[in-house]
Amino acid sequence: MSDKGVPVLVTGGAGYIGSHAVLALRDAGWPVAVIDNLSTGFAFAVPESVPFYEGDIADKELLARIFAEQGTRAIMHFAGSVVVPESVENPLKYYHNNTAKSRTLIEAAVAAGVPHVIFSSTAATYGIPESSPVSEDVPKQPINPYGWSKLMTEQMLADAAVAHDLNYCALRYFNVAGADPEGRSGQSTAGATHLIKVAVEAALGKREAVAVFGTDYDTPDGTGVRDYIHVSDLADAHVLALEALIAEPARSLTMNCGYGRGFSVLEVLDAVDRATGGSITRRLEPRRAGDPPALVSDPARIKALLPWQPRYADLDVIVGHALAWERQLSRLQTKGQDD
């Protein structure tokens, strides 16, 4: 594709989802740069051809310099902390990293006249919805500081869009999984809590077992049901959302990102067993506080507003890509130890 896009700054572009957004932008011909403080990201996840700034989005002077050097006209904002239990134990960290720093970023964007922001939000803004699938219009009642920190940022963007020359899209992710089909990036964080990541680690002997939290939910097999979206499909949605913001600068958008199809914990573990021909040890545990029985998106809005055609909406494909990345990561780690 041609270089039709405006220059984009990706915050947290060395992280899991951010690095896939960088790939999607670059593959589609957009000029892109990355800022990441590498607290949880990895420099190897940023392609060598992409300008990379190691720094923090709380650094207003650095942001101003990047905007000037890159001619930034849009921001994709992924930088932040994402572990729900940690947000309960250390709420102020989450309000600092996810909310206060986002305010600094928005203020810097307004000061520099950057008109478009895509925000990495979450289904955690819904809390425990009364029904599933979940549409964007159900009440927002987060049950943890992580969800609140993201919802507060959505509100700041909404207010800023009224007061300033700015439009935004908040994309509320459901359960992101998988890895780049070409093996260029994937979930690399040690100690990650995502089920598919945990399961493929167990399948490759990096964990002894997978804990199944709750087997008595009102679901077909008693375990929790979630909507798993492939990270590359999610990245594509970001590019399409940015095109929509540029096409209609007076309009802002809030949309779910999911497939509208749920899989239980046991169905996910069965899919990993199919992919490896092995058998993961399953450790049955009590329910965790705050886990809804089912959390599945209603994707009607994103499908109505964007020409989004998911390419990897298949659990076995998602698991296969996650497994391939985990094997590649093992080789990278072994090579690093040998060097």
Image (cartoon, grey):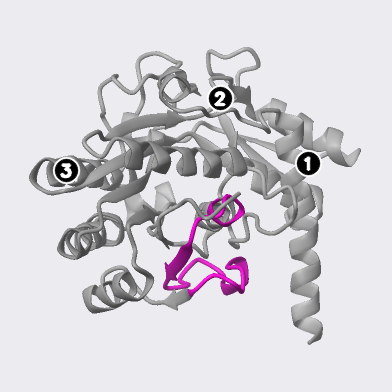
The secondary structure type at the circle numbered 1 is: helix
Counting every numbered tag in the picture gives 3
In the rendered image of this protein, does residue 166 appear above or below residue 44?
above
Numbered circle sitting on residue 320:
1
- Label 3 sits on a secondary structure element that is helix
Residue at the image point whose x is 59% and y is 27% from the top: 309
Kind of residue at disc 2: Tyr
* Of pointers 2 and 1, the one earlier in the residue sequence: 2
As helix, strand or loop, the secondary structure at mark 2 comes to loop
Which residues are drawn in magenta? 25-51
Q: CA distance from mark 3 to mark 1?
A: 40 Å
Q: Residue 186 location, x and y as percent?
A: 65, 55
Cβ–Cβ under 8 Å for marks 3 and 2 = no
What residue would you read off at disc 3?
161
Specify few, some or many for label 1: CA neighbours under 10 Å numbering under 14, 14-19, or 20 or more.
many
Residue at 20 percent of width and 47 percent of height: 166
Picture residue at 20% right of the left edge, 65% below the top: 112
**Is residue 308 shown left or right of residue 143?**
right
